[in-house]
Structure formats: structure tokens, C-alpha cells
Image (cartoon, grey):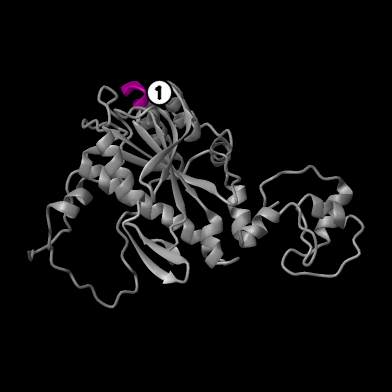
Amino acid sequence: MVSGEEHDLEIAELEALMRLPSDEAVETDEPLLDHLVAKGLAILENGSRPADAPLAEANWNLYSALYHARTRWAGVNVHLEVVDEADEGLLAEATRAHIERYGLPPEHFHSAPDAVETRRLPLVERSGGLYQALAQRKTSRRFDTSRRMREDELAVLLRTVYGAQGTARIAAGAVGVRRTSPSGGGLHPIEAYPFVADVEGVEPGLYHYHSGEHALELLEPMAEPGVRDLVESFTCGQAYFRGASLAVVLAARFERSFWKYRGHEKAYAVTLMDAGHLSQTFYLVCADLGLGAFVTAAINNADIDERLGLDGFAAGSLALSGCGPLVEQSSYLQPEFTPYRPPRERELG
């Protein structure tokens, strides 16, 4: 069902469900209809809708809700215990085994087969500022736990990535907010929930970032090891992420986005894009601060939502970012990339 709950069905109920069309409303005298409606497996067009009421109230599109519900994980553990070079060797061996079974991945560089001609562009390069941050942007899976992240770094990161940068009146009683990342409809429905493990001057625990007040709202104090355990559990056993000083859950207030895009086929996709935009901005600010960063969508959404008191449909988690003092040395998890330049007979600069 679209709310994500699972039900065992009697044969008669399954047969009744199969008699109902999935793509149109019909009149029916199906005797088991009330049972199916109560379980959320059938919807009355103009009647009581108890099981899917949260979806209707938040203006979900039916098929988007189905995808969202069926991809919310709980209790998943991929068992990526990576603590030293020996463990990284196991990962390298797993990669080799995958290639042996499925072959090499598709080529990195794709050429359009029907191109009429190819125009080589001048190699114009910039440095400093944004361009330097882009060049330094990378995913980190190792963090220096002997160093602490500073509170001023936390403050800069949260305000720059998630904080309000400006406001504008858009209608009577309605104000638009500008942030550093784009958002569908200018609605900015993504909320940040920082999990602080080791930030100088900040008590470890689970927080909500109030973007209007630029303030941390403590939801649950925890000892540092407990926060790290929770990050590992919420990222499905990706043990290398537990070393981060800070993790940030990105949770969408779907009802805010869908207030404008009511039952819209593209509304959920736009919300996922919002989380992606914020993740890239998070990476760039971390690069500028000299911090290692990561983002993952392999999360136990349902477990996170339960811990944060979210129902999953009015509001629910989509991804988790994190950062901490950077470990510079290369490894299998953090390979050293050599600079790349397109091959040229001549270069313009």
C-alpha cells in the first residue's frame, strides 16, 4: 500500500483486490471493499480514506507516494566494516569480483553517435574562490578523529548551506526566502537535523537547525559514542561514516512542497533534486573550510523518521550528509586522482 505498511491477505481478499482496476475509478458492489479500504489497498473516490489520509492531507501524487513508501528502508545493514588497510583490501577484492562477473562499467566519456560535427572548445581555466573549492570537492570516508571540528566551522557551514540569505514579499502574508541552493518553486522544503558527535563547544546529540533563527534546537542529548553508533546504523552499516564529527539528516517537509504542486507527478522528483542541490553546496563549503565531506542516500529512512518524530509523509528523511577533519593520505576508499585535461593538438587559454 502507498503508506508503506504491509498486510497479509486472505485468498478471497487478494482475488477481490485483483478485480479492481488500478488506474481508474469504477462503481462496484465488491463485498470485501470495506476490508480493502480499511487496509489502504483501495481508495474511495468520495468517501472515507482512513489509511491514506496522511497522503491526501499532504497532497501526494499516488505514484510518487508508492515509490517513496517502497524505497524507505528500516534495519538494513550492508556490513561495511572498514577500519584498516586489510579491510580495504577486501573491498578491492569485492570490486574485482564484481567486474569479473558483470564486466567493466560503461565508458566514462560518451560520444553522440549521430553528431553532425565536433567543435573543440578552448581550454579556459580559472583558479581561486569557487573554482578552487570545486577542484577540492571530493567524497571523504576517513576522518581525523584526533582533531575536533570547531563551533565556528559548524556555524559557517549550517548558515551558508541551510540558512536564510534574504527574503522577499511574494503575496499578502507570504514571504519568499532565498538560500544558496535552488529549490523547486522557491519553497525550500528541506530541513536539516544535525547529529553532533565531536564539535568543540557543542554538546553531543541530535539537533534541529532553525534556519530562520540560525540556532540549534536540541532534540536529544547523547554521548559521543552513541551519536557515532547511530550514524553507522542510520547509514546502513557504512562504518567509515561513524568517524565524522557531524552528520546532517536532510528531511523534506513534503506538505510544504506539495502545497504548491498538489498531487503533481514531478513534485517528488523536484524535492529529491532539492536534497541534491544542498548536498553539493555542503561539499563546496566543506572544501573551502578544509573539511572532508560525504553524502549518502543509503539510509534507513523509516528508522531515522521514527527517531526524529517524523511520520514519513508529511515530513520524512531523504539523505544524510556528514563532515569532519580531513585525512589527506590516499587509500582505496579515497583514491588520489591525477588532473585530467582533454587531449588537444593545440590549446587556447
* Quadrant of the rendered image containing residue 249: top left
Residue at image mark 1: 224
Residue 319 percent across, percent down from the top left:
46, 45
173 to 5, vertically: above or below? below
The residue closer to the viewer here, 280 or 165, is: 165
Give the residues in magenta. Answer: 81-89
* Quadrant of the rendered image containing residue 75: top right
Specify whether 84 is left or right of 20. Answer: left
The residue closer to the viewer here, 176 or 313, is: 176
The residue closer to the viewer here, 133 or 59, is: 59
Residue drawn where x is 47% and y is 35% of the image: 235
339 to 324, vertically: above or below? below
The residue closer to the viewer here, 154 or 25, is: 154
Mark 1: which amino acid?
Glu
- On the rendered image, what quadrant is the C terminus found in? bottom left
Specify whether 37 is left or right of 220. Answer: right
Residue 69 percent across, percent down from the top left:
62, 49
40 to 265, vertically: above or below? above
In this rendering, does residue 138 appear at all?
A: no
Instruction: For label 1, count other residues whose C-alpha is less than 10 Å away and answer few (under 14), some (14-19) or many (20+).
Output: some
Residue 17 percent across, percent down from the top left:
81, 56
Residue 45 percent across, percent down from the top left:
77, 66
Could you say whether the residue bearing mark 1 is in a helix, strand or loop?
Answer: helix
Q: Residue furthest bottom?
A: 116
* Quadrant of the rendered image containing residue 259: bottom right
Residue drawn where x is 28% and y is 78% of the image: 116
Q: How many numbered marks appear?
A: 1
Q: Is residue 82 magenta?
A: yes
Specify whether 1 is left or right of 130. Answer: right
Specify whether 31 is left or right of 239. Answer: right
224 to 26, vertically: above or below? above
